[in-house]
Amino acid sequence: MSAPNAALTQESGAVVLDPARSIVWRAAVSRSSVELKSFFRNRQSLVFTLLLPVVLLVVLGSIFSGTVPGTHTDFKQMFIAGIIGCGVMSVSFNGLAISVAIERDTGMIRRLASSPMPKSAYFIGKVVRVAVTGTLETLLLLAVAVVAFGLPLPSTTARWETLVWVLLLGAVACTLLAVAFSSVIPNARSASAIVTLPFLVLQFISGVFFPYSQLPAWMQTVAALFPLKWMTQGLRSVFLPNDFARVEPAGVWELDRVALVLAAWCLAGLALSFLTFRWRGPNVR
């Protein structure tokens, strides 16, 4: 065969991976392992990123009672659907933005960029971390919701498929936004406060704790600009009965719009990440 940069080469009848791609693969696997180990060994990250949504679910799920006005749906069911969306955002946005900001401020990112490690391996490691922790977060929340509060699991294949693509698009959008948002964090000390504030605000205005249609119009307008509102709406279509859609602002689930907005945020987050990501922090020499 031919070109030295070919993805595959033929040697003695055997197919061999291009060395360059093999290096990226090995570096990505190694970096992903480091990311997961550092996350699960850090008690603060584990508690506030992974376990906080579970604690919120247990505490607030035990407080809420009654049905959502205009429906026969238990208030807890609506709340649980929103918390699952928050859990995914907590892992993909909060945890990742704080992690990147700390690594940039301490000079770790700069050292990694200066090492022989392919830069793409750094981002692959972050994606693997979000994928693993996001899946674990979702399973934890679903288990608690089903066992403790009787949340009915999706009853059709279509609903399971909706659950998968809503969580996937939402996680990708929030992950890319985290990478971009980390650039506005001035130092590691302020990372947690700066990231937590918008996350908390979005929880209250995105239909997590209160029916979205009952929020003031200006809050609905602001929330509709961000992914969490659309994630929670998609999740309500998965876990709540079809007649609940009549109390949504449009009177229907609008799953096509949910997919469109989340996909648009994925593209916007990718563009923002390319434009704003820095390998060196302002205090790193």
Image (tube, helix red, strand yellow):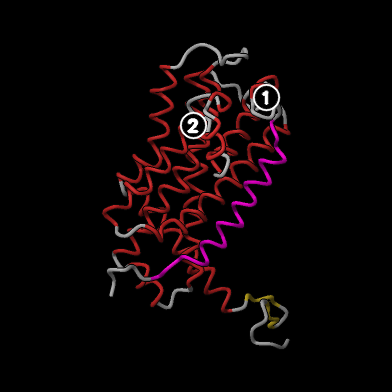
Would you place residue 184 above or below residue 67 in this image? below
Q: Which mark is residue 245?
A: 1
267 in magenta: yes
Q: Which residues are drawn in magenta? A: 253-279
Count neighbours of disc 1 (C-alpha within 10 A) and say few if under 14, some if 14 to 19, many if 20 or more: some
Q: Could you tell me the amino acid type at mark 1?
A: Ala
> Could you say where residue 112 lies in the image, as x and y percent from the top left?
38, 71
Q: Which residue is mark 2?
A: 83
> Could you say where residue 137 lies in the image, as x and y percent from the top left?
47, 39
Please state which of the two labelled residues, at mark 2 or mark 1, is closer to the viewer. 1
Count of numbered badges drawn on the protein: 2
> Could you say where residue 211 lies in the image, as x and y percent from the top left?
54, 24
Tell me which residue sits at (32%, 48%) in the image. Answer: 192
Contact flag, marks 2 and 1 (Cβ < 8 Å) = no
Q: Quadrant of the C terminus?
A: bottom left
Q: Residue 106 sits in which quadrant?
A: bottom left
